[in-house]
């Protein structure tokens, strides 16, 4: 398995990347914004993504976006093809894209938002900390990217203060504080259920 920064030779994988993202979003029913092949193609060509390949076959992907004049960097679109899941590949991809982001934007705060407990655990182990949405980018273009997510109405109702997603931030200035608190999947799972119950109840009214 190789995980590398993308270049023009990886353009041919744009369609299957988008298809894999769409299928995962449908299976989960929540939490993944759709991306067009053209959008993914741009990330690949500019080298703003990493791709996992095994013997030339697509296995996984994640891309970089910058916001607030490169003050914030987001690692987004993490996906692992079903044929390569349950092998620890997601964490390897996240580690690669985090290291690449730090190398490319050494002073930026790196963040992500997700509903998946597995991704929350990976992020925490890599040094991310849960934060409120107010600590993330204020760039409206980022939040507009959530419009294709099935939970976008929740984000609108709360005036972008919270959603079913949890925000996680890696701040290079606070690296010494990494893992100050033990990871607790039960607490995060309970938080997720509370959010779901709260927002779904409001939606039915």
Image (spheres, rainbow, N blue to C red):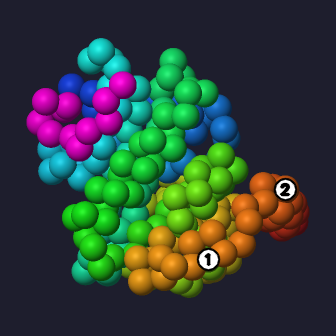
The image shows residue 18 at horizontal and vertical percentages of: 39, 34
Q: Identify the image quadrant of residue 28.
A: top right
Q: Is residue 42 magenta?
A: no
The image shows residue 170 at horizontal and vertical percentages of: 48, 71
- Label drawn at residue 186: 2
Identify whether 31 is placed above or below 18: below
According to the picture, the residue beneath numbered tag 1 turns out to be 131
- Indicate left or right for 90 with 46 as reference: right
- Does dot 1 land on a helix, a strand or a loop? strand
Label 1 vs 2, first from the N-terminus: 1
Identify whether 79 is placed above or below 180: above
Q: Is residue 9 magenta?
A: yes
Q: Residue at x 48, y 26 (%)?
A: 81
Using the image as rendered, state which of residue 182 and residue 24 is in the foreground. 182
Q: Can you name the residue that lies furthest to the front here?
A: 176
- Label drawn at residue 156: none
Q: Residue at x 52, y 58 (%)?
A: 126
Q: Identify the image quadrant of residue 185.
A: bottom right
The image shows residue 72 at horizontal and vertical percentages of: 36, 75
- Does dot 2 land on a helix, a strand or a loop? helix
Q: Quadrant of the C terminus?
A: bottom right
Asked whether residue 51 appears in the rendered view, the answer is yes
The image shows residue 5 at horizontal and vertical percentages of: 23, 43
Give the residues in magenta. Answer: 1-11
Identify whether 156 is placed above or below 32: below
Q: Can you name the residue that lies furthest to the left here?
A: 8
- Indicate left or right for 105 with 16 as reference: left
Q: Nearer the viewer, mark 1 or mark 2?
A: 2
Q: Quadrant of the N terminus?
A: top left
Using the image as rendered, state which of residue 94 and residue 157 is in the foreground. 94
Per the model, the C-alpha gap separating discs 1 and 2 is: 18 Å
Could you tell me how many numbered marks the image carries? Answer: 2
């Amino acid at each position: 398995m190789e995980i590398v920064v993308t270049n023009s030779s990886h353009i041919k994988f744009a369609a299957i990347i988008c298809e894999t993202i769409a299928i995962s979003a449908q299976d989960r029913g929540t939490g993944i914004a759709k991306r067009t092949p053209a959008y993914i193609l741009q990330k690949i060509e500019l080298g703003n993504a990493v791709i996992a390949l095994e013997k030339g076959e697509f296995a996984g992907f994640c891309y970089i976006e910058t916001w607030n004049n490169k003050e914030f960097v987001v690692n987004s679109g993490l996906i692992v093809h079903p044929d390569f899941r349950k092998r620890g590949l997601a964490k390897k991809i996240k580690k690669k894209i985090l290291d690449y982001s730090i190398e490319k934007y050494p002073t930026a705060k790196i963040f992500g938002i997700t509903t998946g407990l597995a991704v929350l655990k990976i992020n925490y182990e890599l040094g991310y900390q849960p934060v409120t949405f107010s600590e993330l980018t204020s760039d409206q273009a980022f939040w507009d990217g959530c419009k294709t997510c099935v939970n976008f109405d929740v984000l609108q109702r709360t005036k972008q203060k919270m959603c079913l997603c949890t925000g996680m931030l890696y701040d290079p200035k606070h690296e010494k504080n990494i893992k100050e608190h033990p990871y607790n999947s039960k607490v995060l799972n309970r938080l997720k259920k509370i959010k779901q119950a709260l927002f779904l109840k409001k939606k039915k009214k």
